[in-house]
Amino acid sequence: MAKIKVTQVKSKIKRPEDQKRTLAALGLKGIGQVVEHETTPNILGMVNKVKHLVSVEEA
């Protein structure tokens, strides 16, 4: 499967709790952190939910 790199570019402060939990589930703990995930429907759904807080690129 293809992989994607997800980078947190904005803070989770003053965001709804579900968005904070989504970032944590993706493994993101702070601005500038990069994680790599398989491109699955679950991961893509989580990325779509917090798309305004992260940037995504193919790995």
Image (tube, rainbow, N blue to C red):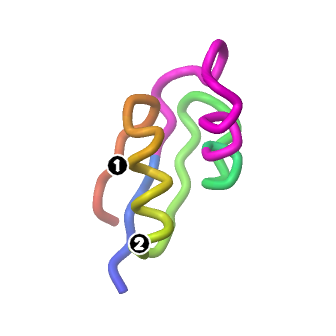
Question: In which quadrant will I find the C terminus?
Answer: bottom left
* Disc 1 residue type (three-letter): Val
Q: What residue range appears in magenta? A: 7-22
Residue 41 relative to residue 57: left or right: right
Residue, disc 1 = 56
The disc label shown at residue 25, or none: none
Residue, disc 2 = 41
Q: Indicate yes or no whether the magenta region holds residue 31.
A: no
Front in this rendered view, residue 16 or 52: 16
Quarter of image, res 21: top right
Q: Please provide percent x and percent y for residue 48.
A: 38, 48
Q: Residue at x 53, y 47 (%)?
A: 34
Q: Residue at x 65, y 31 (%)?
A: 30
Residue 10 relative to residue 44: left or right: right
Q: Please provide percent x and percent y for residue 18.
A: 65, 38
Q: Calculate the distance from the C-alpha at mark 2 to the C-alpha at mark 1.
A: 15 Å
**Sooner in the amino-acid sequence: mark 2 or mark 1:** 2
Q: Please provide percent x and percent y for residue 3.
A: 38, 72
